[in-house]
Image: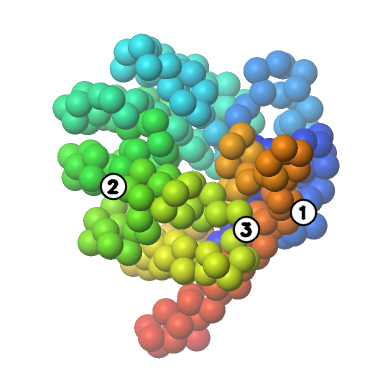
């Protein structure tokens, strides 16, 4: 099994070409981003991916943006999902990462929505991996667990930083639930949260070492589950971002860290850890 890293365009302030060059320089396999709605921008994006031999993960939000339209119905979310899948397919994504649904729906509505969403993905011949995200259906461990129990065919993107801030604690206390849901994990967003926020000021800071270690234990659980299931490739998008996530100095608004430096550091650290842990797994299995 190998680990492929993707660069997010969330928080990237330069051109797509500049993002591609950064991704290639860091040894990342591709870019994760929404498909541009403008045709010329979409064509230019496709050209950059092709020129730099980069893969693509499509980012999709059903209704609204990262926070859903609170008044949108499940049917409207599904219409939004299908239109964005169709747009994303023009860029030949490896898969679609979907922030889907709404946190306020009751469990039976959640299960019905994801059953229909999975059917839409199958109709279009693309894998949709549904993200654990605040404001969305999979905003906490237990709703996610219950939907996955009902729909074992579903695949998820694990961004545990959201759960840490929603639950106001690191996920070690919920490891039984983590171990259960990661059996359906497909993709990782490797941002590090802490009990009072979804993004630590810097993942290298010693005062957040335990938060980093806790997230890494969860990511290890995903890799172990995927190895048992026969995954040949696993994917990760380091996703430290802006928009209230990035800490800034008061009064001046100056950011206290560089987003790409943090994402590059997290990605390369996890690649090294993955290679080390995978070597141990192979050795235990007697494979050389």
Residue at the image position 19 percent from the left and 42 percent from the top: 146
Decide which of tag 1 and tag 2 comes sooner along the chain: 1
Residue under pointer 2:
141
Residue at the image position 62 percent from the left and 27 percent from the top: 35
State yes or no: discs 1 and 2 in contact (Cβ < 8 Å). Answer: no
Q: Quadrant of residue 78?
A: top left
* Inter-mark Cα distance, 1 to 2: 35 Å
Q: Report the mark closest to the observer, 3 or 2.
A: 3
- Is residue 22 among the parts visible in the rendering? yes
Residue under pointer 1:
24
Helix, strand or loop at label 1? It is helix
Residue 167: image location, x then y, percent: 32, 48
Residue at the image position 38 percent from the left and 86 percent from the top: 284
Helix, strand or loop at label 2? It is helix
Q: How is the image coloured?
A: rainbow
* Inter-mark Cα distance, 3 to 2: 25 Å
Q: Which mark is residue 202?
A: 3
Decide which of tag 3 and tag 1 comes sooner along the chain: 1
* Circle 1 crowding by C-alpha within 10 Å: few under 14, some 14–19, many from 20: some
Q: Report the mark closest to the observer, 3 or 1.
A: 3
Decide which of tag 3 and tag 2 comes sooner along the chain: 2
Q: Report the mark closest to the observer, 1 or 2.
A: 2
Answer with left or right where residue 143 lies relative to residue 225. Answer: left
State yes or no: discs 3 and 2 in contact (Cβ < 8 Å). Answer: no
């Amino acid at each position: 099994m190998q680990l492929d890293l993707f660069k997010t365009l969330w928080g990237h302030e330069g051109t797509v070409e500049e993002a591609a060059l950064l991704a290639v320089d860091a040894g990342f396999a591709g870019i994760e981003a929404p498909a541009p709605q403008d045709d010329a921008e979409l064509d230019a994006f496709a050209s950059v991916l092709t020129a730099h031999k980069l893969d693509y993960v499509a980012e999709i939000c059903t209704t609204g943006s990262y926070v859903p339209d609170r008044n949108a119905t499940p049917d409207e979310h599904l219409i939004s999902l299908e239109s964005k899948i169709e747009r994303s397919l023009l860029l030949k994504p490896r898969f679609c990462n979907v922030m889907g649904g709404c946190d306020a729906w009751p469990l039976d509505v959640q299960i019905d929505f994801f059953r229909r969403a999975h059917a839409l993905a199958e109709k279009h011949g693309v894998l949709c991996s549904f993200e654990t995200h605040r404001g969305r259906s999979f905003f906490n461990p237990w709703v996610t667990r219950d939907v996955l129990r009902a729909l074992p065919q579903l695949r998820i993107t694990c961004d545990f930083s959201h759960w840490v801030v929603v639950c106001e604690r690191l996920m070690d206390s919920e490891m039984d639930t983590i171990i259960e849901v990661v059996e359906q994990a497909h993709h990782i967003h490797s941002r590090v949260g802490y009990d009072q926020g979804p993004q630590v000021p810097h993942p290298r800071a010693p005062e957040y070492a335990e938060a980093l270690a806790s997230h890494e234990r969860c990511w290890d659980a995903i890799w172990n589950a995927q190895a048992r299931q026969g995954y040949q490739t696993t994917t990760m998008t380091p996703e430290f971002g802006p928009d209230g996530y990035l800490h800034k100095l008061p009064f001046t608004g100056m950011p206290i860290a560089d987003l790409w430096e943090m994402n590059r550091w997290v990605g390369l650290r996890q690649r090294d850890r993955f290679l080390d842990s995978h070597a141990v797994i192979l050795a235990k299995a007697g494979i050389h």
